[in-house]
Image: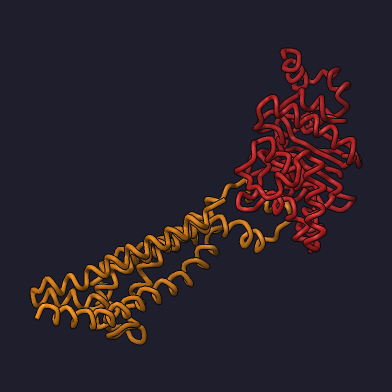
Amino acid sequence: MEFRSVGFRIGERAILNNLNLTIEAGETLALLGRSGSGKTTALRLVNGMVLPSSGDVLVNGKPIREWDRVRLRRSIGYVIQEGGLFPHFTVERNIGLTPMLEGWTPDRIRNRVDELLERVSLPPADFAHRMPRQLSGGQRQRVGVARALAADPEILLFDEPFGALDPVTRLDLQREFLRLRAELRKTSVFVTHDVSEAMKLASRIALLDRGDLAFIGAPEEFRASKHPEARAFLDVLNAQ
Amino acid sequence: MLSDVLRDLLDEGIGLLGEHLLLVVSAILIAAAIAIPLGIAVTSHPKTRALALGTANIGQTIPSLALFGFLIPIPFIGGIGQHTAIIALVIYALLPILRNTVTGILGVDPSVRDSAEAMGMTRGQALRMVELPLAAPTILAGLRIATVTTVGTATIAAAIGAGGLGVFIFRGIASVDKLQILAGALPAALLALAADAGLGWLERRLARW
């Protein structure tokens, strides 16, 4: 995945300026920044939910503009806050959606759903037939992750996945995230404004400051960064 | 003596009730066939949406008796009889259905809409599998409002020779006969209540998630 001099603006307002970034296969990149730093926009550029105003975003070497957008999105898992589950579908139908769109047989979908529910520590017998409203916030988030993994995508995108959770559940899911990361080795990008979360979960951190890339590197390097925005985030970390 | 009068009313009433139902059901089906697709089509275009809702709004501000009168001299669609009445009723029923279709689709949680797109649903799949099912209770609420008001408005259709329960009411008014007025008004009110209850039940069933 690669961002080549990517700019994005809405009317006159610049959201991202000349962003250059390469994301290696198998790594977990955190897009860190304050609200309005452009981090969610950067994430949404990867699966073509928004298109760059200038420059190019490449996935598997091919610019987003040349991808069939539907195909692209089905090969990228996407998890948002609270899971973004379809409230009128059971857990099973939510998770099996992309495989269903891809024309898998019902048996194959059912097996895959069970396997994924096990993977995110929700016993299928208990959870497959529940509706999203019958789940806690943490459980919804787990289902959201299972759904994103359903069609075995190479890339996973997370938009503030743990933002709306209580601290205990949050820690629980962060541990789960690390376990899945080690097991699956997918290329993952996640957006967060929580610096400790970025330090804990990411192999590299990209810090965005008002649309500019202020820093990119491993968490240890981030600690040593002299950039004022990086210092501001490190102050938060030290104050905890 | 009184029972003879009642039997006559009942005999005639069943026929008129049938006509009334026919007026209401055809008007609602036609209005739904126009307003629901139109509502879906204009949802994503704010300008056409405002135009469509504005036009439907104007349709509804015309006093019903006047609308029936206006339609009579218009060639092809006008004249005396049921089809003119149905056209007028359709014009009235459009707004609630159109407005609720638009409200229902726009009311779908943006994060759910986002998910549908991000998971690689085509526009048609997102509409069919996510937006319409989630908007269905609201759309049905619009159909319910339209049906209940149409049951009432359809009584005026008798003024242009379209039959229905309004025949009793107009005749009762002309002959100062309370029994005749009641024979038209009471079944119309009960019909409206029944439609309200039936569609309300369906609405709650659809919203069970």
Q: How many marks?
A: 0
**As drawn, is A102 to the left or to the right of B112?**
right
Chain A color in figure: red
Which is nearer the eye, A135 or A125? A125
Color encoding of the figure: by chain
Residue A96, position in %: x, y? Answer: 75, 54
Q: Quadrant of residue B86?
A: bottom left
Q: Quadrant of residue B14?
A: bottom left
Q: Is residue A87 above or below residue A163?
A: below
Q: Is residue B143 above or below residue A199?
A: below
Q: Quadrant of residue B57?
A: bottom left
**As drawn, is B126 to the left or to the right of A5?**
left
Which is nearer the eye, A205 or B81? B81
**As drawn, is B99 to the left or to the right of B37?**
left
**Chain letter for the part of the structure drawn in orange:** B
Residue B191, position in %: x, y? Answer: 31, 68
Question: Which residue is painted at 11% across and 70% down in the image?
Answer: B178
Q: Is residue B108 above or below residue B95?
A: above
Question: Which residue is painted at 27% across and 85% down in the image?
Answer: B80
Which is nearer the eye, A67 or B102? B102
**Quadrant the N terminus of chain B occupies:** bottom left
Question: Which residue is painted at 26% across and 81% down in the image?
Answer: B163
Question: Which residue is painted at 25% across and 67% down in the image?
Answer: B63
Residue B150, position in %: x, y? Answer: 33, 68
Residue B58, position in %: x, y? Answer: 34, 64
Q: Is residue A56 visible?
A: no
**As drawn, is A145 to the left or to the right of B130?**
right
